[in-house]
Image: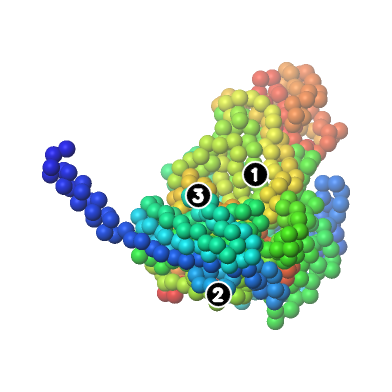
Amino acid sequence: MNSFKLSIVFGLIIASNLFASNVEKSLYIISDSIQTVDSVSVPYLSFNEEDVYSKESPIISINSGDTLKVWVYNLDSIIHNFAVLDFSDTFIIPAGDSVYLEQVFMDEGLYIYHDPLNYPKNTYLGLAGMIVVNDLDVQNFYWNIKEHNAQWNSDLVNNLDVDWGNYDPKYFTINGNSNPHINADSSARIIGSVGETLYLNIANTGLSIHSMHFHGYHAEIMYSSAHANHVGRIKDTFPVYPMETLVLKIEPHQPGEYPIHDHNLVAITGNNIYPNGMFTTILITP
Amino acid sequence: MKQLFYILFFVLNLNARAQDQTTFIFSKMDIEAQHILWDDTPTMLMGFTAMMSASIDIPGPTLTYFEGDSVELKLRNMSQGTSHTIHLHGLDVDQQNDGVPHLSFEVGHNETESYFFRAPHPGTYLYHCHVTSALHVQAGMYGLLIVKPNTGINETWEDGFTFDSEQAWMTSELDLAWHEDSIINHPHDTTTMEFHLPDYNPDYFLVNGRSEQQLSEEGISIIASANEVILLRLANIGYYGNTYRFPMHLNARIISSDGRPLPDIEFSDSLTIMPGERYQVLLQSTYVFEDDIEIEYFNLNTLSTTNTQLVPVSISGYFSQVENQVDKIKLYPNPSSNNVIFSNEIDCIKLFDSKGRLLLTKHHSDRIDISELAKGIYLLNLDSETKTIIKN
């Protein structure tokens, strides 16, 4: 390689590093509760950006090439683990202790960070969030979808056994909310205009398969953590498997307000009441 | 009778290409349990019919249009007080015609309203009621909607794949508890969308509303010739997942989903279809064989398979050979309940059931008596030519 080519290579490396940055985050594991759509209080855990409880684990959004530097603090009274699914090592965090993770994310995609200890127990109880690696200047929306059986949450936090093979959830949520409260969540409710490019980032941190159907629009699969061969498909119904992440691109061609919901129509219920489950609407202006 | 409805609808809708189409459909509800399941259990349905006097069947009539058709779909609600709608699943119609209560209009009892849309991309779609949808879909208010390309009815889409024959399977489940009069015949309260539903524990696992031995009797099974290209349209309107397992010899090619071609065709002997999804698959065997297509129904929460249905596949004769000999021997009537008459005397007639078992041999005759046979599909070997007949 002559000196001219060498200088170009060094130049490219320096240029790429100019755009990459360090993203520092803190996550606090806190045990508390979540309110169901019918106001039942259910034991729950979450990661939090501060040492104050919020039911929904934070969305960490970075660019490709960025280095994510995360301190995870265990404010619970029992041991927890921390890992980025299929990406990082697993870190053990004793009660009251903390761990530090430094990880470079080179590729665009959608990743799940969670507590894999006694899987699926701690993940099911709420300890799962998403890392979005996306360089596009587009409007993004985020769905952390999951389900609950309220009795199971109580049993699990009391160290009682549950039969995972007979899972029968009664509440179905997007970012911890069920219909009609999902539309009040600005990160979940898709709002845009005709011709705009909208991205929906979906992480299924529950135990069930959800089959999300769009009225009004088809969307393109831009990323799938479980089915790479599905990328590029244009569909109106999108299965999301447990612990799968999916990125969809929507380019609305018409205005209107249209439902998006699980087409396992049982999942539109909340404690058997229709339509108090995974049901929201997309709102597109002309 | 159900086949007659399909034929009528097909004829009514195929009379021209890319033009104005008006289709009538009726929403109804059984007064008493009259739909008979595979084990002779009667059950009540809500559903759509093509004629006012027709009994409800599941799925409802298949609506077929050509790409670009301007469609007026008129819904006459004949049910017992409950409003209904038609959601045109996957057609991406405008909000007014999307069939969702509170976002568009409902069709009240004894009312008639119209949905207007233009048939979009060729493919396989659904329609279903979206009022208290979890209940009304389970009750039977669903059907297939097929959009064919303008270039020709035996092409998947313009410059797509050609095929020789096609079949459509719509899978679902049925939970008898949801079909009890106290549930299905619910009072309609226009002031609230909320409705209390039972737990869902399906008892029956259906292909086109049929299961078990009905999958042979009702003409759902695949009867084809080697080299024949079959377009199989698959749709899941149930609340369970389906995994199809195709016999290796069918050389399954998965070509499209949800009304759009796949970027890359997949060659696979298995295909999983979740609630609301549709897929189109091409099947073509170079072998003569008999087998089953397995359809596993699995619970989306436990991820465990609850039931498996087997749809018979019978590949006999060779498509090009049959095609060349089509004019040599004609038979009528078909379907028939008594005699099937041939256009000329046959030296050797052999009758087989769908499993390939020889039932009868007859020589030097121009007819065969099938009055003693059970209803179903049979194969006739007429000298060197193979024909399929239906006993009704």
Q: Amino acid at mark 1?
A: Thr
Residue farthest toward the bottom in the current orientation of the protein: B191
B53 or B194: which is nearer to us?
Answer: B194
How much space separates mark 2 and mark 1, taking CA atoms? Answer: 45 Å
Front disc: 2 or 1: 2
A189 or B42: which is nearer to us?
Answer: A189
| Callout 1 crowding tier (Cα within 10 Å): few <14, some 14–19, many ≥20 | some
How much space separates mark 3 and mark 2, taking CA atoms? Answer: 27 Å
In the depicted structure, whether residue A285 falls above or below residue B201: below
Q: Chain of mark 2?
A: A
B81 or B350: which is nearer to us?
Answer: B81
Residue B239: image quadrant is: bottom right
Residue A23: image quadrant is: bottom left
> Residue, x 35% and y 55% (percent of image)?
A65
B49 or A3: which is nearer to us?
Answer: A3
Q: Which mark is residue A167?
A: none
Q: Amino acid at mark 3?
A: Asp
Circle 2 is placed at which residue position?
A52
**Colouring of the image:** rainbow
Residue B220 percent across, percent down from the top left = 70, 42
In this picture, residue B298 sits left or right of residue B155:
right
Residue B168 percent across, percent down from the top left = 63, 46
Residue B272 in sight from this viewpoint: yes
Q: Are marks 3 and 2 in contact (CB under 8 Å)?
A: no
Q: Which mark is residue B243?
A: 1
| Callout 2 crowding tier (Cα within 10 Å): few <14, some 14–19, many ≥20 | few
How much space separates mark 3 and mark 1, taking CA atoms? Answer: 34 Å
| Secondary element at image label 1 | strand
> Residue, x 78% and y 62% (percent of image)?
B199
Circle 3 is placed at which residue position?
A89
In this picture, residue B352 sits left or right of residue A198:
right
| Secondary element at image label 2 | loop
